[in-house]
Amino acid sequence: MKTVTSLKKVETKIRSLVDAALEKSGGLLRLAPCWVPRSFLQPGRRLKLHPDDLYAYGLDRGGIDERWFGSTTPAANENRTPDEGLSYCVFDDARFTLANAVQECGAEIIGESIWTRFRRWPVYSKFFDNMGPIPHHMHQSEEHAKLVGQEGKPESYYFPPQHNTVGNNFPYTFMGLEPGTTKEEVKRCLENWNKGDNGILDLSKAYRLKPGSGWLIGPGILHAPGSLCTYEPQWGSDVFSMFQSLVEGREISRALLVKDMPPEKHFDLDFIVSELDWESNVDPRFKDNHYLEPVPVAETRSAGYIDRWIVYGKINGEQLFTAKELTLEPGTKCTIRDNGAYGLIVVQGSGKMNRVTLDCPKLIRFTELTEDEVFCTESAAKAGVVFENTSEVEDLVALRYFGPGVNPDAPEMGAHRDKAL
């Protein structure tokens, strides 16, 4: 059986491999699983990774609790491997990073608009899976991330039912701050970092998480993700700032509060709090302005399939990423046309996508090649991708995410409340 490590790693002159792969597949690139550990978290064991491989990077690196999709973004982990966080394309007996493929082929893969503006694939998605909650934290805005040579990070959540048959220890997420909270109260929490629980959650509100729903979270908004396995389309950055000192009895290093802040500001509490989007955090209509439920793209159930928006809406007036969930009933075949390139992961069933086999694995070894992840080029997406469910008994379900500005027809925030949809 071929594994990722048994394939020849190619780093230069990959255009001919990309061209051959796209020709054979019908405009698609097969991707190998991209596993990422986090040293301060406990894996939730719903990524389908074999239990013996949860600590494949070593116990000191932490358990693997994330799988990244279509990523050209390095993971910001200490002591990381050189390609940690980067997705690999696989073709015949070779492998090469999606990042290198995009740099080599540019608009041919991600489209002229995104290539011209960003010169890279600027977004990615992941499965984020933990046994319990993670610390109340935020991701820097573009303005603040630039101070340390990084990019800001808005993100979104969708809780796929297929990966959430159990909710684990705490299926609730604290988000934002209670209306009326003051900056002085937040600064007092930061002052008390080394005294134990700094009390930041006393200033926030928890929302119960529901499989099949999601959230849109802009930069500078505090959030403490709960224990559902989460599909997270997001900007291609790994900046963050932890505001909580103790989680389930585990100490959170203060270094994680300031890791993406200028060194001279590490003890400047006014500056640290200024990185929060204060108005969004204390918004009395927080849920109305951030909560998502699926919205059908069109009424196609009679044809045996349904495509639904699962991530939509704008952040600071701009559409940065969107996502859809496609479900085909057994035996169904359909053509899906999209406006731009996308990354796709299968969460249930088996079938075909153009000339590529799709199959959702039951259990995955750390270096195993799977048939559940694909990157679709813009030209193939616009021409129309043929999906087929080859099963006689099980739905084929796939999630796909898109880059900035690709779907101007996507719903506005709150569209799920419109009964006409």
Image (cartoon, rainbow, N blue to C red):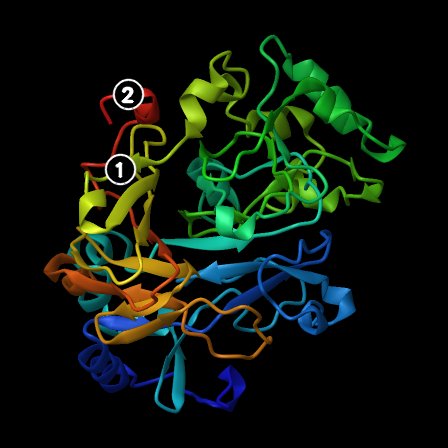
**Relative to residue 132, is residue 249 drawn left or right?**
right
Q: Nearer the viewer, residue 97 or 381?
A: 381
Between the C-alphas of marks 2 and 1, the distance is 12 Å
At a point 33% along the width and 26% down the height, the residue shown is 416
At a point 58% along the width and 60% down the height, the residue shown is 47
Q: Is residue 137 above or below residue 350?
A: above
Disc sitting over residue 77 in the figure:
none
Q: Where is residue 191 shown, x and y percent of the image? A: 79, 26
Q: Quadrant of residue 375?
A: bottom left
Q: Where is residue 84 shown, x and y percent of the image? A: 55, 68
Q: Residues within 10 Å of mark 1 (few under 14, many from 20)?
A: some
State yes or no: discs 2 and 1 in contact (Cβ < 8 Å). no
**Relative to residue 400, is residue 299 drawn left or right?**
left
Q: Where is residue 311 shown, x and y percent of the image? A: 36, 39
Name the residue tied to disc 2: 418
Taking the view exactly as shown, the residue that stands out farthest to the front is 392
Q: Amino acid at mark 1?
A: Pro
Q: Quadrant of residue 87?
A: bottom left
Name the residue tied to disc 1: 296
> Is disc 2 placed on a helix, strand or loop?
loop
Q: Is residue 310 above or below residue 396?
A: above
**Relative to residue 313, is residue 261 drawn left or right?**
right
Q: Is residue 251 above or below residue 179?
A: below
